[in-house]
Amino acid sequence: MKFETTIIGCGAATPTLRHKPSSQLVNVHDRMFLVDCGEGTQMELRRYKVRLQRIDRIFISHLHGDHYLGLVGYMSSLHLLGRKSDLHIYGPPELKSLIELNMRVSQTYLSYRYEFHDLQFENPELLYQDLHLEIISFPLKHRIPCCGFLFREKKRALKVNKDVIAQFRLKSEEVVRLKRGEDIVLEEGRNLTSAESTEAPPAPRSFAYCSDTAYDESLVPLLKGVNLLYHESTFIDQEAKRAKETFHSTASQAATIAKLSEVGRLILGHYSSRYDSEDLFLSEARVIFDNTLLGQEGRTYEVPFLEKISGS
């Protein structure tokens, strides 16, 4: 099943021709989630042939413009496209007032209903869950209230061997019990154990998005063992003082968090416009955490199983 993120924008606040403002499209089992919505996000989604209507939930990490200024335009386009289904928006409480103001002064009356969910910035919070997935927000250390987001698969049931089902002509209720880890007694009196008839499912995968944050080791317990981590790296070490002043991170600091958290793979992003190349970001990070990749617009990153990472 698919679990991947596509970077729509990975630049910092000052716009450049090389990078777009922050946004990512997370695909979990063909459910689409938009994380941050910087200016021009809808245009980039069209560039990458993403159907805007497929996205039902949008998560805004904080109210710096490079993370949310594309939202109202995106919502208006959904209206023009005739959307009817509900849209769920998760963000700082003040964002709802900003949306309402824009809609009111432009006399825009949406063709669909949107439901706004307030984020809180003190503790991790379960925002959404279904049969296969849970999404958790967690506070980041930034100049204004800011959240990261953790997408985590739920543990799958055991898989009953098809040959066992055919051999013993198992009934559906017997298959269900074996999946739950229970042993069953067949009609002929034979004891059939779950251990001998099932296969363990793949371990659940997880993806964490750390948008804007200063170096913060308190994140390590929450990020422990995450398969794929996106962590901002606005500066390189030469600008470590500036990073601290602006509550951002350097590439080596992002790599240190990845190493301490024992994540599978790290993606860097949120590059300052002062740099003409990201090569220094990558070289500084890989000294500390070798399995580091550069974030690039339009590139899709699979959330890998840990065994796949170790064998790659």
Image (spheres, grey):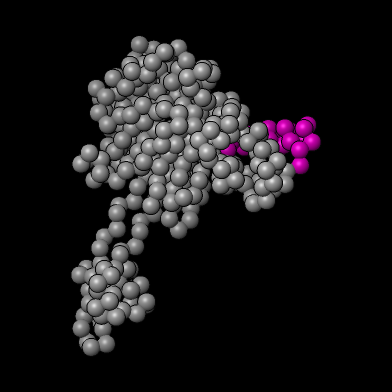
Residue, far bottom? 188
Identify the residue shown where x is 45% and y is 12%. Answer: 274
Q: Residue 55 falls in which quadrant of the image?
A: top right
* Left or right for 109, reference 144: right
Q: Nearer the viewer, residue 182 or 77?
A: 77
Q: Residue 182 falls in which quadrant of the image?
A: bottom left
Query: Is the residue 186 above or below the residue 99 in the image?
Result: below
Query: Is the residue 186 above or below the residue 292 in the image?
Result: below
Q: Is residue 287 visible?
A: yes
Does the magenta-highlighted stretch encompass residue 48?
no
Identify the residue shown where x is 77% and y is 32%. Answer: 106
Q: Quadrant of the C terminus?
A: top left
Identify the residue shown where x is 29% and y is 80%. Answer: 169
Does the magenta-highlighted stretch encompass residue 104?
yes
Q: Is residue 36 visible?
A: no
Identify the residue shown where x is 65% and y is 33%. Answer: 73
Give residue 5's position: percent from left, percent from top. Answer: 43, 39
* Left or right for 3, reference 77: left
Give residue 112's position: percent from left, percent from top. Answer: 69, 48
Magenta span: predominant SS is helix
* Left or right for 120, reference 245: right
Start-end of magenta stretch: 91-109
Give residue 123's position: percent from left, percent from top. Answer: 47, 40
Q: Nearer the viewer, residue 163 or 145?
A: 163
